[in-house]
Image: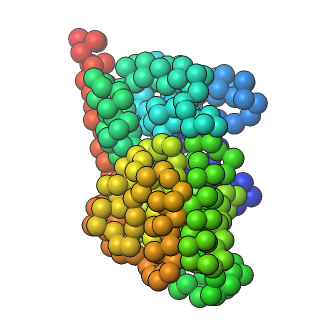
Amino acid sequence: MITLPLPTAERPGTWAPIASQIGALRSCGIDVDVLEVGGPPKLKYLAAMRRLRALAAPCDIVHANFGYCGWVARSQLRRPVVVSFLGSDLLGTAGRQGKVTLSSRAVVAANRRLARLVDAVIVKSAQMARLLAPVPAHVIPHGVDTRRFRPLELDKARGRLGWNPDGRYVLFAGNPANPVKAFGVAAAAVECARARSNRAIELVPLTGIAPDEMPVHMSAADALILSSYWEGSPNVVKESMACNLPVVSVPVGDVPRLLAGVEPAAIRARDPDALGGALTELLDAPRRSNGHQELERKGIELEPAAAKVAAIYQEVVTSSRRSATSRRS
């Protein structure tokens, strides 16, 4: 498994879903070695290519997460390669005005080329799969560990965080410094909700938080707002569902499908007034959602997702061995 650095207690990050998937694959009986790609930006991928040659020798398959890691995986030709595209590697990266940058357009074009050079492709949403056509892609959103992400008592969760028991708290889904997440839109929406309800509302960005503390924040908050210009299958929405936290989101990625049947929840245009209106309705009479129930009903849990990935591994390895036998004969 090739991935960018996985999160630790000392270094929280956005790659927790990959770490959870690795654990679930190991529970399926698969022996997973991990190559974390870290170091100086201009050198780390070349260094990873050198390390991969030794690591890949005893393996049956190389699975790369994210486009750049996919090129590392494909630098060797002895083992079949599976690539999981995660979002911006196919959808692009936004500048300050929400438009795809020229440099990321080049990266997207390269990754579409990469998809034709590997043995199997996994994406997180149907939108991403359409971008790769006619190359076939398996749509497998990351599953959620419902043993970790589950509803906690609101008062106890707020007590752990030192939050006001009677306050109103909205979580922002991402790092405010990331232009793709459109923090300004979310902040303006919360300001609209403050003006409409005439109450204090605190916007809490979900950044720099240890993975084990995420369920506490999601159980302590009143709502999550997602205003991104684009997403694949945002785990933060699925994790909020698992904690029964209501979600207000723009129609991005597979969020409309995820929130279908979830109450209360809202899909609105990327407009502060529209998003603020939805937040006001939720915050005037706060209650928990039925998200956990819907998550289970849709099978978006960790184990079913890992089983689908394991099935792809089996298919790829079987095909690779068949091809090798054919060449020898």
Place of residue 276 in the rendered image (x, y in percent of width and height, measured from the top left): 52, 64
Total residue callouts? 0
Which scheme is used to colour this image of the protein? rainbow
Rendered-image quadrant of the C terminus: top left
Place of residue 25 in the rendered image (x, y in percent of width and height, measured from the top left): 42, 51
Q: Could you say which is closer to the camera, residue 144 or residue 131?
A: 131
Q: Residue at x 72, y 54 (%)?
A: 11
Q: Residue at x 35, y 58 (%)?
A: 258
Q: Is residue 194 left or right of residue 22?
A: right
Quarter occupied by residue 309: top left
Place of residue 130 in the rendered image (x, y in percent of width and height, measured from the top left): 32, 32
Q: Could you say which is closer to the camera, residue 164 or residue 219?
A: 164
Q: Could you say which is closer to the camera, residue 141 or residue 234?
A: 234
Q: Residue at x 51, y 43 (%)?
A: 229
Place of residue 144 in the rendered image (x, y in percent of width and height, measured from the top left): 43, 61
Residue 94, relative to residue 195: is it above or below? Answer: above
> Can residue 166 be seen by looking at this rendering?
yes
Residue 312, relative to residue 275: is it above or below? Answer: above
Q: Could you say which is closer to the camera, residue 12 or residue 31?
A: 12
> Can residue 306 be seen by looking at this rendering?
no
Q: Is residue 112 left or right of residue 329?
A: right
Q: Residue at x 47, y 45 (%)?
A: 231
